[in-house]
Amino acid sequence: MSSAFYGNHASRRQDSAVRLPQIDYWLLLAALALLLFGFVMVASASLVIADKNTGAPFFYVARHGIAIAIGLGASLVVMHLRMEVWEKSGTVLYLLGLLLLALVLVPGVGKTVNGATRWIPLGTFSLQSSELMKLFMVIYIAGYLVRQQVQVTTSFWGFAKPMILLALACALIMAQPDFGTTAVLLATALGMLFIAGVPVWQ
């Protein structure tokens, strides 16, 4: 009996030791492959320019590497957050995204490059608030579709409410101006609404 107990206990310890996190490893592999490909492209394209502008060939490569490290660190934090946390924080994140988009347009706050005001300078790097809004908008609409699925599929008002909020965000992005991000945001949101069952005519 004792040998069976210890055998089962050892088996459970072995199972817990080799159990991997429940994530989409194919998606993770694709993301890492894109990350590596992008790093190689940045290195290939920037060595000569960095040497000419700064005298250090790997200046932009190093900056890009730091950005990758920050992103990977943030991804580890995000990976440990439960989906319920994202769903409940959708409205707060959307409002935060709007605030950041508005801050970009405040004179003296937003940074203008080549006629476009899209960045908020934060010391050694700049924050592009419209990139955060892409994520925040998706989180908000996903949560809204879960909460209001019946209204979304049966009522025009259920479709119109998120579109009004989306239009407000797009108006602030177009004021920068940034048509590319606006198009991506619209296409993503409309795709989500369509998959959720919104009639095609709407």
Image: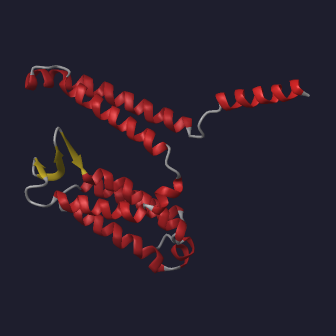
Question: Which residue is found at the position 34% from the left and 70% from the top?
Answer: 165
Of 124 and 139, nearer the camera is 124
The number of numbered badges drawn on the structure is: 0
Quarter of the image with the C terminus in it: bottom left
Image quarter of residue 46: top left
Position of 178 relative to 153 (above/below): above
* Colouring rule applied to residues: secondary structure
User: Of residues 12 and 106, which is closer to you in this image?
Assistant: 12
Q: Is residue 106 left or right of residue 160?
A: left
Instruction: Name the residue at 38% across, 70% down.
Output: 163
Q: Residue at x 41, y 75 (%)?
A: 160
12 lies left or right of 140: right
Residue 121, placed above or below residue 41: below
Quadrant location of residue 72? top left
Looking at this view, name the residue that lies furthest to the right.
1
Percent x, y for residue 157? 45, 80
Q: Is any part of residue 173 visible from this angle?
A: no
Q: Is residue 26 left or right of residue 160?
A: right
Q: Position of residue 181 (x, y in %)?
A: 29, 53
Q: Is residue 125 above or below residue 135?
A: above
Whether residue 42 is visible to the viewer of this picture, yes or no, is yes
The quadrant of the rendering that contains the N terminus is: top right
54 or 52, nearer to the observer: 54
Counting from the top left corner in percent of width and height, residue 84 is at: 53, 57
Name the residue: 84% across, 29% down: 5
Give the vertical position of 149 relative to 3 (above or below): below
Q: Considering depth in this image, is 192 or 80 the residue closer to the camera? A: 80
Q: Position of residue 120 (x, y in %)?
A: 18, 50
